Amino acid sequence: MNPAERFDRYQQRCLYDPDAGFYAAGGRAGGARGDFLTSPEVGPLFGTVLAGALRSWWEEAGSPPQWVVAEAGAGRGVLAAAVLAASASGDVPLRYVCVERSAALRAAAVELLGERATVADSLPPRADVLLANELLDNLPVRIVERTGEGWAELWVPEELRPTDLSLAVDVAVGCRLPVIEQAAAWVTAARAVAPRVVTFDYGVATTAELVDRAWLRTYAHHERGSDPFVEPGSVDITVDVAVDQLPAPTLVSTQAEWLERWGIEALVEEGRRVWAERASVGDLAAVRARSRVTEAEALCDPDGLGAFLTLEWLTPPQ
C-alpha cells in the first residue's frame, strides 16, 4: 500500500513512473496497436496542414536560414513524420526536435524518423515554434472539492485535506474540479523557449463550464473510462483543459477553424482532383488523395476532433 499522496503526484506516478507507468509500459496513441487516437494518427493530412502554417510563419519571420520547430509530447513521432514529408515544408530549412519524456516512445520516434529529426527528453533552450498536440490535457492535475467550509484537496486514497488552493467559481458543496497548475507552468516555460507556442487540446473556455461535465477520463485499448484508480499504471489519465486557468492565449479557435484557416479545404479539393484522375489506376497516390476526404471529415468533426481547442501564444520580438 502506497502512503497517501496528492492526486497530481499519484497521476504523475501512474503515467510516467519509469518502471510501472502507463507510457513506460507501452501506452501510446495509434490505431489497432494504440490506446487512443489523436489527430496526427488519423492520417498525414493534419501534418500537411501544419507544414503549410510553419512555412507561412517562416516567411513572416523573414525566411531565416534555420527554422527550429520543437514538438513537446511528440510520442512516437507521427506528427513530425507527416510535417517533414509534406511538400509545403520542402524548401523551409526545418530543424524538427521531438521532445518526449517516455524512453519507450523516444526509441519508437528514433526508429520512425531516423536522422530526419532530433529526438530529446527535454525542450531545447530556444526554438522558433513550439508545438504540443494533446499534451496539456495529459499533465498531472490537482483536484479540489467544494465543502461547507471552502475548498479541500483530494488525496489518494480517497481523502480530502485542507488546502490553500481555491477556484473563483460558484459551485455546490461536493463539486470537484481540476486545478491545472502544471499546464499553466508549462505554458509559461514554453513561452520562454519560443515566440510562438501552439497547442491542440480538448477543453473549455472557463472552469465553470466543467461543472456537471465528465472532465476526467481514462483510456486504454481505445476504451474510454472515468475511474483513474483501477489498476494504476494501466490507463491514460486526462482532463479537459480550462483555458481560464492558463496564461491568456493570443489566439483561440477550434481545431476545425484553425485547419480551415490554414488550407485544409484546398488540400481536400486537390485530393479529389488527383483521385478523379488516377482512380482507374488505383496507385498509392490515388489512395492517398482519396483518404484526404475521410481524414478531413474526422479532423473537423464538430462532435469530435474538430471541437478541440487550438491555443496560440505569440510573444513579440524583444
Image (cartoon, grey):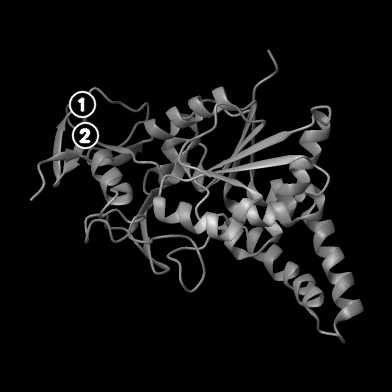
111 is higher (above) or lower (below) than 73:
below
On the image, the x and y values in percent for residue 95 come to 68, 40
Mark 1: secondary structure: loop
The amino acid type found where label 2 is placed reads Glu
The residue under the point 83% across, 31% down is 63
Across and down, in percent, residue 316 comes to: 69, 19
User: Is 194 on the left-hand or right-hand side of 18?
Assistant: right
Which image quadrant: the C terminus?
A: top right
Amino acid type of disc 1?
Thr
**Residue at image x 70%, y 63%?**
296
- Is 49 on the left or on the right of 280, as rendered? left
Residue 303 makes an appearance in the image: no
Q: Nearer the viewer, residue 54 or 141?
A: 54
Residue 22 placement (x, y as % from top left):
33, 56
Helix, strand or loop at disc 2?
Answer: strand
Q: CA distance from mark 1 to mark 2?
A: 6 Å
Tell me the residue that label 1 is attached to.
Answer: 163
Give the class, few, some or many, for how many residues have Cα within 10 Å of label 1's Cα (few <14, many ≥20).
Answer: few
Give the residue displayed 60% in from the left and 55% down from the top: 114
Residue 11, position as x, y percentages in the image = 28, 46
- Contact? badges 1 and 2 (CB < 8 Å): yes
Residue 224 visible in the snapshot: yes
* Tag 2 residue: 153
Q: Earlier in the sequence, mark 1 or mark 2?
A: 2
Furthest-bottom residue in view?
280
Give whichever of 131, 206 is nearer the camera: 131
